[in-house]
Amino acid sequence: MISPPPTSASETSAIKIVFMGTPQLAARILEILLRTPREQFRVVAVVTRPDQPRGRGLRLEASEVGSLAEENHIPALKPVRIRTPEFVAELKSFEPDLLVIAGYGRILPDQVLAAARIMPINVHTSLLPKFRGASPVEGTIMAGEPESGVTIMRVTKRMDAGPILLQRHILLAPDETQGSLKAKLAELGGAALLEALTLLRRGELAETEQDENLATYTSPIAKEDAVIDWEEDAGRIERMVRAYDPWPVARTRLGQDELLVWRARLVPGLEKSVGSTEAPPGTLVKLKPGPIIKCGDGVLELVDVQGPGRRRMSGADFMRGRRVSTGVRLGE
């Protein structure tokens, strides 16, 4: 069991937390944490990325976590570099008992991790040791996993390899997207974090080492990763569409234009009936009721798509508006 130091985290004093995160998922976890009584857990500062230019006017705007900190009058540190003595000194000045990290997006050096009197902990959006790394939600969907979850873990030098403090599971819906799953995991992660912190206050929080033999890894996602390879089987492409919604969005080419694919549907058993056996992957083999595309194995219906400068619409409406005929090949 992990016992909190009596001078900083006893039953009669608040655990002081510096929260480190950036995106909406992290902001929701922070929001849940801020609902707890300040005499139990007190967020004394947040660390988030520097303000970024956004919108048409490219005005500098705070991250989702930075905005939430401002609304709650919490000091927000926005370092460009986190390895400088100046930043480490500023971080230590808050005398945190814990660093709570959720979607911060940077590998933290030893001197930053050492700022926590008790330990640094991370809210990771997968069931570790599976899907370590930068894109666990996308990786979970791409792999066709039946479930996901959150892992509260102690941060160590190796990425996402620290001991597990607490895990909570959730089943995936058949139409689960990156966006819907992140929203669910934010709620689950906030609740799991509070549960772990409560166990810590009681001296009842235990560590479990990860099984390295079960470890898998994910990499950061870039736009080029979202280009559909129609040589892949239909099931994998359908999962890719869901995994990259709302960003970077699965995409292909139709003639000279890029076509975003927002929703796709598997159509089992249709390949032979539409005479697509000999068609090369990427071929449009049927238009009604929706456009059917031949894949490396199986076929896929394009349910919702978006052309350049156009709104998102049904695949049938898009193809009809473009007067596309069967036999056209996507991705060329």
Image: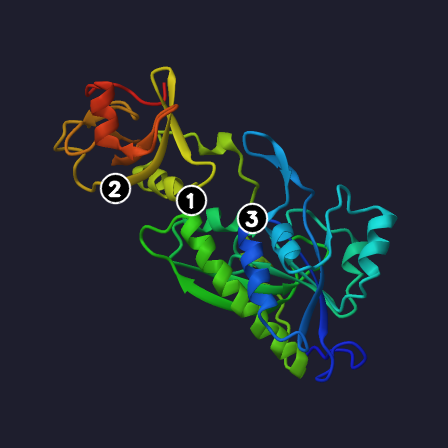
Q: Is residue 263 visible?
A: yes
Query: Label 1's element?
Result: helix
Q: Residue furthest top?
A: 256
Instruction: Give the label, 3 or 1, closer to the camera.
Output: 1
Q: Is residue 153 left or right of residue 254?
A: right
Q: Which residue bears the numbered disc 3? A: 217
Residue 305, percent from left and from top = 32, 32
Specify few, some or many for label 3: CA neighbours under 10 Å numbering under 14, 14-19, or 20 or more.
some
Q: Residue at x 41, y 42 (%)?
A: 245
Between discs 1 and 2, the one toward the N terminus: 1
Between discs 2 and 3, the one toward the N terminus: 3
Residue 331, percent from left and from top = 36, 22
Circles 3 and 1: CB atoms closer than 8 Å: no
Between the C-alphas of marks 2 and 3, the distance is 27 Å
Query: Label 3's element?
Result: strand
Q: Which residue bears the numbered disc 1? A: 243
Residue 8, percent from left and from top = 78, 76
Q: Which quarter of the figure is the N terminus placed in?
A: bottom right
Circles 2 and 3: CB atoms closer than 8 Å: no
Nearer-the-camera pick, 9 or 140: 9
Q: Residue at x 84, y 61 (%)?
A: 93
Question: Amino acid under label 2?
Answer: Leu
Residue 128, percent from left and from top = 55, 60
Q: Is residue 282 left or right of residue 145?
A: left
Q: Which residue bears the numbered disc 2? A: 266
**Coloration of the structure image:** rainbow
Specify few, some or many for label 2: CA neighbours under 10 Å numbering under 14, 14-19, or 20 or more.
some
Between discs 3 and 1, the one toward the N terminus: 3
Q: Which quarter of the figure is the C terminus placed in?
A: top left
Query: Label 2's element?
Result: strand
Nearer-the-camera pick, 192 or 12: 12
